[in-house]
Image (cartoon, rainbow, N blue to C red):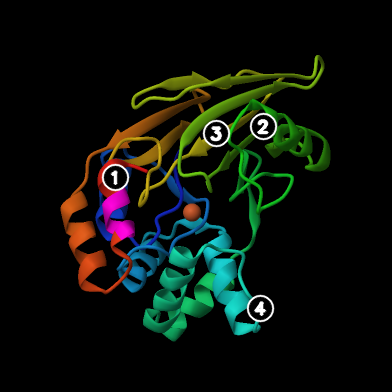
Amino acid sequence: MRFAVFSDIHSNLEGLQAVLEEAERRGVDALLCCGDIVGYGADPNACVGLVRETGARCIQGNHERGLRELDEGLEPNMNPVAMEALHFTRAALGDDHREWLLSLPEELAVEDSLYLFHGSPADPDEYVFDSFDAAYALKALAFEYPPPANFLCFIGHTHVCAAYAFDAENHRVGEKAVGGGDRFLVKPGAHYMFNAGSCGQYRGGLPVATLCIMDADEMNVEFRFLRYDVAAAQAKIVAAGLPVSLARRLGMGQ
Ligand SMILES: [Fe+2]
């Protein structure tokens, strides 16, 4: 069984298409998404429609939760640019797509194989930026979530790919920098957390769309960094009247 795991599409249709084409090329059996399907980009309806068409199993990110908070008269905890994009998304989204987004769970156990979270397993709003954050997150995964799926999880939220491992016996956490094409073995006896990066707004310094290919038979996780039509996504953001900074950052991968 092979899974394609991706995250943080953020209404970037070109990035999502690149990821789905790679998943198809690799012949994966199932698609998994760690949330933030919308927000920031210009194509919320097309992205939600495409994700739903593929049958990908998805969870909510903080941008989906932001839509619900707006409905409830609450103020989402977001910066002004993200808020502007959230209001754009709310106005643009069709009712059916909106209801589907709001129906998504905040976390998901995928059979006995793995968990999906948007932010940290300890708290969906928390970012996991380094091994210190990862220690807290992996202890929550190991001790608060039931086996057998709690040996492995995928997250998003930071928009940067990363790999962490936790040896529960010795309470030791390992962190590895991730590049495109890197492959990590998932060994018995440890707990693993992989950040799938972002399809639609990568922040690791490269203008790419990223995904993970998880081979549950070989027990390895491969990271793919994909070039996509950044200029087209940028032009749509500008044409939609969204903040220009959202277009600019796609070109810098930040
Ligand atoms: Fe995000």
Disc 4 is placed on an element classified as loop
Mark 4 / mark 3, whichever is N-terminal:
4
Disc 1 is placed on an element classified as helix
- Residue located beneath label 4 in the image: 74
Query: Badge 3 local density, few (<14 within 10 Å), some, or many (20+)?
Result: many
- Residue located beneath label 1 in the image: 24
Check if mark 1's residue and mark 4's residue have beta carbons within 8 Å. no
The amino acid sitting under disc 3 is Phe
Magenta part of the chain: 245-249
Mark 1 / mark 3, whichever is N-terminal:
1
CA distance separating discs 2 and 1: 31 Å
Instruction: Reply above or below: 164 against 29.
Output: above
Check if mark 2's residue and mark 1's residue have beta carbons within 8 Å. no
Disc 2 is placed on an element classified as helix
Q: Position of residue 38 (x, y in %)?
A: 43, 65
* Residue 216 in sight from this viewpoint: no
- Residue located beneath label 3 in the image: 194
